[in-house]
Amino acid sequence: MKLRNILVAASILATPAAFAGNDWSFKNVSVNWLDWSNGTETRTNAGAFAGKKDFAFLEVEGGFGGDWGEAYGFFDVENPTKGASETDGRDKRRYAAKAVARFNLVQLGGVPVQAYVHLYDARDHGTFFSQNRVLGLGTSLSNGNFWIKPFIGGHQQFDRNIGAHANGVMAGYVAGYSFQMFGQSFMATQWHETEFNRDDKFLTMGSPAGGVTQGNATGQNGAVSLWWNVSKEFTTGLQYRYADQKLGSASYQNAMIYTAKYNF
């Protein structure tokens, strides 16, 4: 998928008019700073690659839904002030995009069964490329101010110099809880993904002790967030980002993300 196609996909997902008769929608732009923990930087920078360094990123995000189901997407530009030929590869400008769609199929005992598809794409200017593709089933459940949307599906991965191959199973969820405190509007959210039975060809990772190692067949990836809706237009948030046996490193990694969003 070329970068222009990622941009087109993200813009479609951020545009409610992409499907007629939608019931809800949102879209925003944000400025973010990701601050890796000192331990993460120490462990990952000892390896042969996938060393971590703090960075800023810009994001466009949107979603919409109706009786048919729902869709969500974002597009990130990491290190937006940097270029393609930075001496330190961690400073290179990078791009990340994700598109998720859930299509309502049937109700079983009042619980919706949904077809689930998602695509996540991460790349820089020519030296790194990785794409995760998932096709499976999901559902959407809610009770009062709490909601959760789990999924499970077959996972295919497409990496530079490896190609596209089946890579086990991915399962996960997004969840949220909105509440009022001190007269202000808040929301706590989490997204989490677990990859099972991954293929050996995708498990070459940087070792915390230095050099290259074989990662585990199971990997974890996600974030826990707290959002303060200051006004209809402005949201600020704090996210705890975590990963284990992911992001090119056979170690636990964690960071804080500081976010300011403009909603429109």
Image (spheres, rainbow, N blue to C red):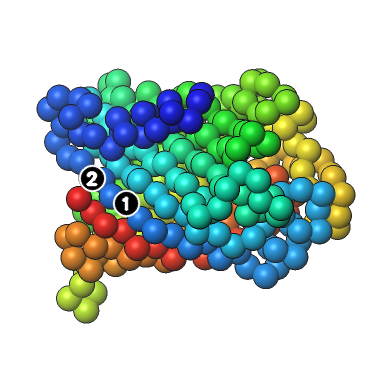
Identify the residue at horizontal 34%, vertical 37% (top origin). 72
Asked whether residue 138 appears in the rendered view, the answer is: no
Q: Which residue is mark 2?
A: 26
**Secondary structure under badge 2?**
strand
* Dot 1 and dot 2 residues touching (CB under 8 Å): no
263 shown above or below 258:
above
Q: Nearer the viewer, residue 260 or 165?
A: 260
The single residue placed furthest to the bottom in the displayed view is: 182
Q: Position of residue 74 (x, y in %)?
A: 39, 41
Asked whether residue 120 appears in the rendered view, the answer is: yes
Q: Spatial distance from mark 1 to mark 2, Cα to Cα?
A: 11 Å
Q: Which residue is mark 1?
A: 29
Q: Amino acid at mark 2?
A: Phe
As drawn, is 116 to the left or to the right of 91? left
Q: Amino acid at mark 1?
A: Val
Identify the residue at horizontal 24%, vertical 34% (top origin). 15
As drawn, is 27 to the left or to the right of 148? left
Q: Position of residue 45 (x, y in %)?
A: 76, 58
**Secondary structure under badge 1?**
strand
Nearer the camera: disc 1 or disc 2 = 1
Q: Position of residue 195 (x, y in %)?
A: 61, 37
Identify the residue at horizontal 61%, vertical 27% (top origin). 157
Identify the residue at horizontal 20%, vertical 34% (top origin). 16
Q: Position of residue 171 (x, y in %)?
A: 52, 36
